[in-house]
Image: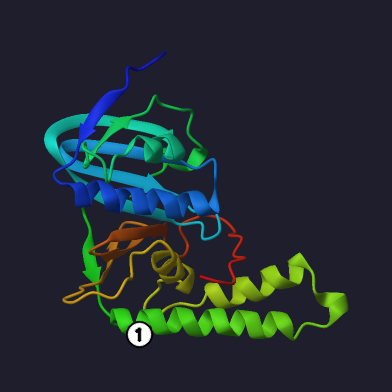
Amino acid sequence: MTVPVRSLEFADAREAADLAAFLGRLLRYDRAAAVRMQAGGSALAVFGRPPSFEVLAIRAARLAEPHDFDVTVSAGELLESLDVEGTAAGSGALPAPVTGPPWTGVLPPRGGWHELPGLPDPVSLRTAVTAAVAEFRSRDEALPEDRRTRAERDLIGREIWSRTVADTELPLRAVHAAQSLGFLRPAPDFPVALLAAGAWLRLRTPFGSIALRGPGSGLGTLAVTVGAS
């Protein structure tokens, strides 16, 4: 069934620009990416899944008027609809829905989150990602020619990015995802938090969140092959 395209008016142009930046980063990892959009009142949540990290990325935006919808759309079409510099800056359109990939049917809960202790500060998190990327490159370059295969590189990536952060259960790949998607940018008064709800973990920053199922949740094996931010 065809759903009419609806216009979106954001609270200000910055909201649309930040959403556009998020979509652009998602599309860098998957040119055919889809996003699930949930609006309630003036709050909009956009969910994406960058395949290299196998986490859910969440970007929130404020709308100028209340809306109520839940739809999966093409990330590329949504990005193309956003006006971030023209006379209608701060506006966009809701593209026609698409058949979403399986992950769109399994989203983290909306409520019931509580904060967990032990998460390092943002500077330490960025430092950890930088060190991990350097380690991946060093170990990859040290591989003998006959072992320089995708399988060997996957093993190195899995070992590095599956490490947990400090005394938490948050895997380092979630922090890498946050860094790569622009959620860990340097900023004053930058609060970050690690939250949990049921089997889910969530790394929350002022610019977006990374959510994933925690250890023992039955999520299955994960392909971790990222080697650069």
Q: Is residue 68 left or right of residue 138?
A: left
- The residue that disc 1 covers is 124
**If the image is split into quadrants, where does the N terminus sit?**
top left
Asked if residue 116 is positioned above or below residue 27 in the image, the reply reads below
Q: Position of residue 152 (x, y in %)?
A: 75, 72
The residue under the point 21% across, 54% down is: 112
The residue under the point 40% across, 61% down is: 181
Asked if residue 8 is positioned above or below residue 191 in the image, the reply reads above
Question: Which of 49/92 is in front?
Answer: 92
Question: Which of 149/76 is in front?
Answer: 76
Q: Is residue 51 left or right of residue 177?
A: right
Mark 1 surroundings: few (<14), some (14-19) or many (≥20) residues within 10 A: few
Residue at the extreme top? 1
Asked if residue 21 is positioned above or below residue 105 in the image, the reply reads below
The residue under the point 61% across, 60% down is: 223
Q: Position of residue 4 (x, y in %)?
A: 32, 17
Question: Which of 218/43 is in front?
Answer: 43
Q: Position of residue 79 (x, y in %)?
A: 38, 41
Callout 1: helix, strand or loop?
helix
Q: Amino acid at mark 1?
A: Ser
In this figure, what is the number of numbered marks?
1
Report which quarter residue 165 is drawn in. Answer: bottom left
Residue at the extreme right? 146
Residue 73 visible, this orientation: yes
